[in-house]
Amino acid sequence: MNLLSVIIPAHDEEESVERVLRDVDKQKDKLKDLNYDLEILLVLNCCTDDTGAIAQRISFAYDIPTRILREERKGYGYAHRLGIAEAKGDILLTLDCDNTYPADIIPELLEMMEQGYGFITTDRLSLQPAMGKTSKLGNFLLTLAARCLTGQKMADSQSGMWLFRRRHIADLLAGIGTGMELSEQLKIRLARTAHWTEVPIKYYERTGDSKLNPVGDGIRCLWRLVIT
C-alpha cells in the first residue's frame, strides 16, 4: 500500500480545523481503492488558540490519522518545510486549514498523479472563487508577474492546494522563502523539473479571519519571483 501525506499548515484556525480534518478523512475509502493509505500532518504555526486541542480531540473521536506538529517560527513557509520534512508519503499534498479548498477532489487529483505527473497544482481563479476583490486582484497580479518573470504558464501561482512526488523535492527547498512566497517559488521550481498540469477547482469562503498581510506578503512574493 502506498501512502499519501496531506500537509495542513494552521495559524489559529480553531473555527475551521474540525471540518477540514473530517473532510480530508472522508476520502480514506476512495484513496484505498487507489491503493493509498492516508496520513494528515497538521502543522501548528505559532498557534495561540485551541486549534491543536480541537484537532487532537476530533482525531481521537473519529479515528482520523493525524500527526500534530508544532513550528514556533512564524511563517507559512516554515510550516510547510516542517510538514515536508516529517511526511512519510510517496506523494505529498498541501491544503490550507480554512475550509476554502475542496477535499473531495483529492482522490481525483491522486488518480491523475498516477498517470505520470510529478506535480499537480490547482487553479482557484477560473471558476468564480469566493474571494474578495482585493484578493482577486492581488492573486491575478502575482500570477501575471510569475508568468512574465519565469515563463511558467500557471493560471494561479498562489493556490494553496498542490501535489508533488517526494523524489522531486529534495533539491528544491534551498533558498526558498519562509512565508507565503514558498508556495509560488516551490511550484515554479517543480514546474521546471517535473511533468506537471493545473486543475481548476472551486474555492469557497474561508471560515474565520484571514491571516494574510496583503501588502507585506504581496511584496515578499513579488521579490521572491524576481530571484527565483
Image: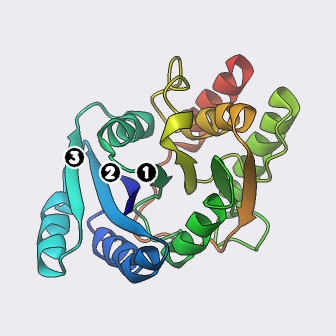
Dot 1 or dot 3, earlier in sequence: 3
Check disc 2 and report its element: helix, strand or loop: loop
Q: Which residue is mark 3?
A: 69
Q: Amino acid at mark 3?
A: Leu
Tag 2–tag 1 contact (CB < 8 Å): yes
| Crowdedness near tag 1: few (<14), some (14–19) or many (≥20) residues, C-alpha within 10 Å | few
Q: Element under label 1?
A: loop
Q: Position of residue 118 (x, y in %)?
A: 64, 46
Looking at the figure, which quarter contains the N terminus? bottom left
Mark 2 or mark 1, whichever is nearer to me: 2
Q: CA distance from mark 1 to mark 3?
A: 19 Å
Residue under pointer 1: 211
Do the residues bearing badges 2 and 3 touch, measured as CB atoms within 8 Å? no
Q: Is residue 211 above or below residue 82?
A: below
Q: Amino acid at mark 2?
A: His
Question: How dense is the environment of label 3, judged by Cα within 10 Å: few (below 14), some, or many (20 and up)?
Answer: some
From the viewer's perspective, tell me whether residue 213 is left or right of residue 69.
Answer: right
Q: Nearer the viewer, mark 2 or mark 3?
A: 3
Residue visible at 32% across and 78% down in the picture? 22
Q: Which amino acid does the dot numbered 1 rest on?
A: Lys
What residue does disc 2 label? 11
Of tags 1 and 3, which is closer to the observer?
3
Q: Position of residue 139 (x, y in %)?
A: 71, 50
Whole-percent x, y for residue 80 in the image:
41, 40
- Residue 96: numbered disc: none
